[in-house]
Amino acid sequence: MANVMDTLRARGFVKQTVYEEDLYKLLGEESVTFYTGYDPTADSLHVGHFMQLIAMKHMQDAGHRPIILIGGGTAMVGDPTGKTDMRKMMTRETIDYHVSCFKKQMSKFISFEGPNAAIIVNNADWLTKLNYMDFMRDIGVHFSVNEMLRAKCFETRLEKGLSFLEFNYMLMQGYDFLRLFNDYNCKLELGGDDQWSNILAGANLIRVKEKKPAYAMTFTLLTTSEGKKMGKTEKGAVWLDESKTSPYEFYQYWRNIADADTEKCLKLLTFLPLDEIAELVKYNDERMNRAKEALAYELTKLVHGKEKADEAQSQARAAFGGSGDMPEKHVKPESNSIISVLVAAGICTSNGEARRLIQQGGVSLNDKKITDINEAVNYGDVVHKGKKIHVKIIFD
RNA sequence: GGGCGGAUUGCAGAGUGGCCAAAUGCAUCAGACUGUAAAUCUGACGUCUCCGACUUCGGUGGUUCGAAUCCACCUCCUCCCA
C-alpha cells in the first residue's frame, strides 16, 4: 500500500516525528493503531479539531486504525499548554454530553465500521480509578522534574503560576498512551504541534517502561499567515455544528480567507488532489478567488453535506454577484425600523451601534445605501451591512 | 504563615481628588481603494429617547461640594521570604 507518511508530508501535515525512519517503515508494512486526543471542552468540534480529523481520515484510508481518545479525565485537570489561565473543571455529565456530540460530528469523516473501524475511548475510565501511590511508583518515577520544567509547554505558565494539578497533566497524558499501547496495541500518537512535549512524554514512557517502540508525530498547527489560530473570529470559534455556525457562515469563513493561506488550507483540509490544488492557486491575482471558492465549497461539503454546500454557494454567489436567493434571517424586531431590525437580526449588538453604522454609510436596504436611521424595513427586504453581510429579512 | 505589589472599558496598558466615558497600542466594525484577499488612508469603537442624559474603573461601606483616584473591610492574583 502507499505509505500514508508520503501523503501527509506532501500535504504539509508533518511537523515533528520521532524515529522517523522506523515509523515510516512500520506504516508501510502493517495496519497501525494510532490515537489522537480530544478535550471535551465544548459541545461541538471546531475548526481547530478539523485538521486532525482530516489527518485521521488520511490514516484510516491508508488502512490504519484510529482511536479517538476523549480527555474526560484530563479535562478535569485542564491542559496548561499555552494557556494563560487555569481552565474550568467540568462535571462528568457535561463531558458525556460533549462526547456524544463529538461522535456525531466525527462520524462524517471517520468510519466507525469495517476492518479498521475507529474506536472512541475516554481516559476518565482509567484515570479516575487510579491509586495515587501506585501511580506515583509506576509512572511518576519515570518522569524528571528537571526535564519537565524545561519543556516549552509550561513556559508561559511558569511566569503566571502553575498548579501542581496541572503540572501532572503531562504524566496523565503519558499514561494514556501507555494504557492504549497495552490495551489496544496502539503504537502512535498524533497531535498538534503544541502537544509535542506531552506526546513525547507518552512515547518515552512506553519505551522506558515496556522496552518497546512507540512513536509520536505532530502536525503543523493550522494558523493564519498572521500567526493566529485558524478558525477564530470575533464571535468565537468557527464550529462544525450548524446550529452554532451556519453552513453559510462556515462557507463564508473559508471564502474570505487570506490569499497566503489558501494553498495551505486546500492541502490540509480538503482531499482534492495535489495537482488540482496547484492549478487552482497558480495565479496570484483575482483568479485566486476560484481557489477560495473551491476551498469553501469542499469544506462545507465535508462538514455539512453536498446539499448544504450547494445552497451556501448559491447564496454566496447571489449575495455578492447580484440577484438570487439570499440567506434568510427570521426576526422578531420591536418595530420595523431599520435599527430594530439590525439589532434583532444580530447584525448589531446595540441600537447605538446600529445608528452609527447607518450614519457612517455602512448599511444598504435592497442595494440602496440608506442614511435615515428611521428607515422602515418590509418583509423580504434585503439588508446589507458592509460588503460581506447580506440578509433577507423575514418577519416571524 | 510573613512581606511587597496589583485588580481600569475585548486584550495590553496610561490615569493617583474635578479638565475622565477615561491616553496610547492591538483587535474589531464601517468608508475609500480592491479580487468577498492583503496593504494603505479615513472614521467609529459603554448604554440610551444620541448635539443631551445615564451607568462604568474587583466587591461593600466611608471621607468629600465632587472619587477610577483618599480611607476601612472583603475577594482574587503576581512576586519575595518560609
Image (spheres, helix red, strand yellow):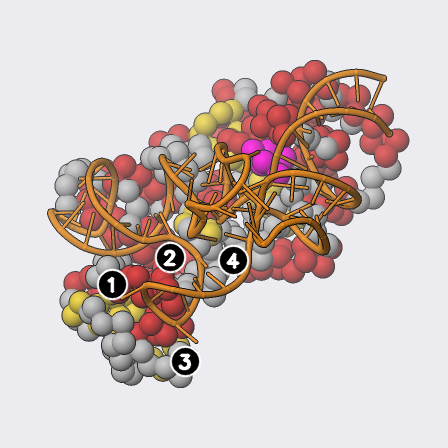
Image spot of residue A142 (x, y percent): 76, 21
Q: Any mark on residue A359, and which?
A: 1
Q: Any mark on residue A105, and which?
A: 4
Query: Three-letter amino acid code at disc 4?
Result: Gln
Q: Any mark on residue A250, and which?
A: 2
Binning the other alpha carbons within 10 Å of mark 3 as few (below 14), some (14 to 19) or many (20 upward) gives: few
Task: Give the residues drawn in magenta, as a range.
Answer: A80-85
Disc on the earlier residue, 3 or 4: 4
Res. A123 visible in picture: no
Disc on the earlier residue, 1 or 4: 4
Q: Quadrant of the N terminus of chain A?
A: top left
The one of A104 and A333 positioned closer to us in this rendering: A333
Q: Any mark on residue A334, and which?
A: 3
Query: Three-letter amino acid code at disc 2?
Result: Phe
x 49%, y 42%: residue: A52
Q: Are marks 3 and 4 on the same chain?
A: yes
Left or right: residue B10 versus residue A38 is: left
